[in-house]
Amino acid sequence: QVQLVESGGGLVQAGGSLRLSCAASGRFFKSYAMGWFRQGPGKERELLAVISFDGGYTYYADSVKGRFTISRDNDKNMVYLQMNSLQPEDTAVYYCNAELRRLRVGEVPLPGIYWGQGTQVTVSS
């Protein structure tokens, strides 16, 4: 079992940056692919970025490619999402997710069963 706790959300002006963190517990963390999702007001949950257990594979949604960077530190059981050039449409609750599947080039990864509680990101214009 994995427990995930996100932090780092907040209010930022358009064009600004934030770094989200996800602290994971559980001895299997190092073997899990990890990802970030978000859910904006009135929208479905959206996959943003995925990183494999060793960092050798990453996936980004088109909406964040070139602006967001996912990384992980297996020694600290942490996953990060660096978000640059934030825009009002990035306003959402951001969720950490563990044990994603189908990490293949050309395919969209599938979410895992472990979720954090979410952290709010609000971007003002």
Image (cartoon, helix red, strand yellow):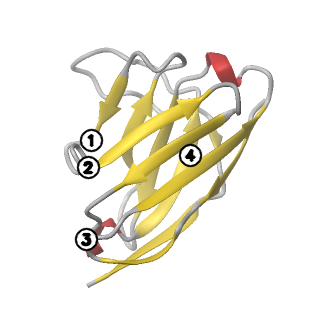
Q: Amino acid at mark 4?
A: Cys
Q: Closest to the observer: 65 or 114?
A: 65
| Disc on res. 61 | 1
Quarter containing the N terminus = top right
Q: Secondary structure at mark 2?
A: loop
Q: Which residue is mark 4?
A: 96
| Disc on res. 64 | 2
x and y, in percent, of residue 86 in the image:
29, 66
Q: Amino acid at mark 2?
A: Val
Q: Nearer the viewer, mark 2 or mark 3?
A: 3
Which of the two discs, 2 and 4, labels the residue nearer the N terminus? 2
Query: Which residue is at a point 32% across and 30% down the rendered structure image?
Result: 59
Q: Nearer the viewer, mark 3 or mark 4?
A: 3
Q: Which residue is mark 3?
A: 15
Q: Closest to the observer: 2 or 79?
A: 79
Q: CA distance from mark 3 to mark 4?
A: 23 Å
Q: Secondary structure at mark 3?
A: loop
Quarter containing the C terminus = bottom left
